Image (cartoon, rainbow, N blue to C red):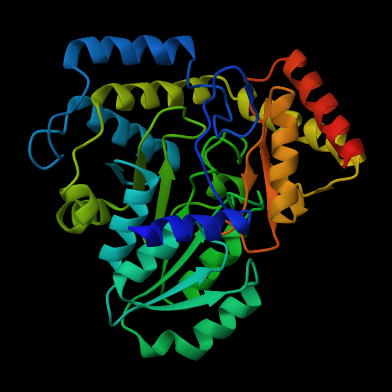
Amino acid sequence: MEWLKEELDRIKKASLYRSRSLREGILDFCSNDYLGLRDHPEVIEVSLRVLKDGGLGSGASQLVSGYTKYHKALEEKLAEFKGTECCVVFGSGYLANLGAISSLVREEDAIFSDELNHASIIDACRLSKASVFVFRHRDYHHLEELLQTHRRSFRRCLIVSDTVFSMDGDVANISTLKRMAKEYECMLYLDEAHATGTIGKSGKGGLEEFSESWEEFMILMGTLSKALGSYGAFVCGSKALCEYLVNKARSLIFSTSLPACLCAGAEKSLEVIEREPWRVKKLKTLSERMFENLRSFGFDISFHQTPIIPIMVYDEKKALSIRDALLERGVFIQAIRHPTVAIGKARLRLTASLRYSEEDLELLFSSIKSVAIAC
């Protein structure tokens, strides 16, 4: 199929070509392992024990025979952690958003979505066949204008937003979104993938950060694969919501369930976060330190008190050049380009992690400074 080669050539010429990079031999400064829990001794120990007891795979979907005491225990722990009635675990964040959103709204319904929401939310909105109204990023006056104009024309409505936006690191105003959802009788769906374990005094996410409490019209989605250091995702909410998703979310019904060892590891990570609240505070302090050190090197660096610190380059080709120059020094920060971000908004997505040693940070700072001088 010659058209495949032609399309790949077009992608390469636009500096948008992607390839996978092996992590061996380099220092990773762009992963989402914010709290350094993926190889925490207790997390590894419990994961190995469950792996040896129950085997590698779960063997079936949750509704066949793939639902174990480890899945149930994790769901109960997550519901407690998020302050909700109930929780359902999914195979990944993408599957959670796809399954939950597409089952909550239909053709006669509407979705009001932040323009910088994650790709999985965008695809879920399309799959739902609901009418989608996109409001300007964190522009809640625009959201209210859309609600005033369109809300009464639809049966059910869903307001959906990332809590911490994955490419910019900025934070949605949860109090404002909650108020609008109540006022206009909408469901509020918050993607807390990058908020869980990173914001709020004890890492519980957006509600804690804004001193808000969960209410029945709110749906909290999150992932196990970032600050919790495991893999998979979850949706927290009311008992009725969980029962509904188990019966209607196709990405849950027709997917093999998570391996039990991943559930056990994620539950242990939650225990560590609750037992050691200093981790969340230390992550914020580290993020601030990284920003303060790097902004003096001449790059345009955004910072919103989260561990996501985008180094704005804007030009796609230049972003690749800087990434490659850093790789030569053993430092890996991936260049993020279209379609993940808009054309002309290319960046290097640097993240803070408790995994970094002082030597790692010194190498990071010196490498970026050298590259900045060379540019």
Query: From this viewpoint, is residue 63 visible?
Result: yes
Q: Nearer the viewer, residue 269 or 117?
A: 117
Furthest toward the front, the residue is 2
Q: Nearer the viewer, residue 212 or 197?
A: 197
Determine the image quadrant of residue 52: top left
At horizontal 53% and vertical 72% (from top left) the residue drawn is 180
* The C terminus: image quadrant: top right
How many numbered circles does the render carry? 0
Query: From this viewpoint, is residue 215 visible?
Result: no
Q: Is residue 307 above or below residue 220?
A: above
Q: Is residue 97 above or below residue 108?
A: above
Classify residue 338 as left or right of residue 97: right
Classify residue 144 as left or right of residue 61: right
* The N terminus: image quadrant: bottom left
Classify residue 78 as left or right of residue 7: left
Q: Is residue 207 above or below residue 152?
A: above
Where residue 44 sits in the image (x, y, percent)?
A: 40, 13
Where residue 58 sits in the image (x, y, percent)?
A: 17, 28
Classify residue 374 as left or right of residue 349: right
Where residue 225 sits in the image (x, y, percent)?
A: 44, 34
Where residue 319 sits in the image (x, y, percent)?
A: 72, 47
At horizontal 86% and vertical 36% (from top left) the residue drawn is 292
Furthest toward the left, the residue is 64
